[in-house]
Image: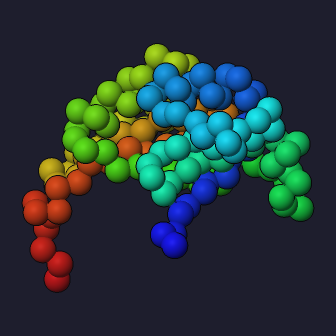
Amino acid sequence: MTRQIFVNLPIKDMVRSQAFFRSLGFDFNPQFTNDQGACMVIADNIFAMLLVEPFFQGFTKKKIVDAHQGTEVLVCLSCESREQVDELVAKALAAGGRAPMDKQDHGFMYGHGFEDLDGHQWELVWMNPEAAPPQA
């Protein structure tokens, strides 16, 4: 069996969160989506589980972090090009997200990112390993 990853994120509003991520081009697996959780398909084996806060709280005894105030995780997604990085950030901003950091261009690596409606920070990166500096 191929290993999969499910990043679980607490959200406040299921309808708004799904609309936000759909506007970025992501879809949801209806088999694992209801009013408490939505399985966002990122790639064949990568998923983000958007869980409304009361449901998310059932999986931990710890306090849920307000991602607008603190950072609990940085979700980083690879992109196929610099242009795709910029396109996804533009779509996120148009859908109500914000860009917490400036673009970073290191030649072999280009990145930018956005905060979703719940403040979770998504980093987008394009890398050209052939242009990376040699390891010492």
For image coordinates 55% across by 19% down, the residue present is: 96
Please state which of residues 33 and 97 is positioned toward the viewer in this rendering: 33
For the point 50% across and 54% down, which residue is it?
46
Viewer-proximal residue, 10 or 121? 10
Residue, x 63% and y 28% (percent of image)? 18
Most extreme residue toward the top, as rendered? 94
Q: Is residue 14 above or below residue 4?
A: above
Q: Position of residue 131 (x, y in %)?
A: 10, 60
Colour convention: rainbow
Q: Give the answer, above or below, for where 3 lies relative to 119.
A: below
Q: How many marks?
A: 0
**Is residue 66 visible in the rendered structure shown here?**
no
Q: Is residue 131 left or right of residue 5?
A: left
Q: Position of residue 104 (x, y in %)?
A: 29, 44
Q: Can you see residue 33?
A: yes
Q: Residue at x 75, y 48 (%)?
A: 65
Quadrant where the image shows the C terminus: bottom left
Rendered image quadrant of residue 29: top right
Residue 67, position as x, y percentages in the image = 68, 42
Q: Position of residue 77 (x, y in %)?
A: 41, 49
For residue 56, side relative to residue 107 (left or right): right
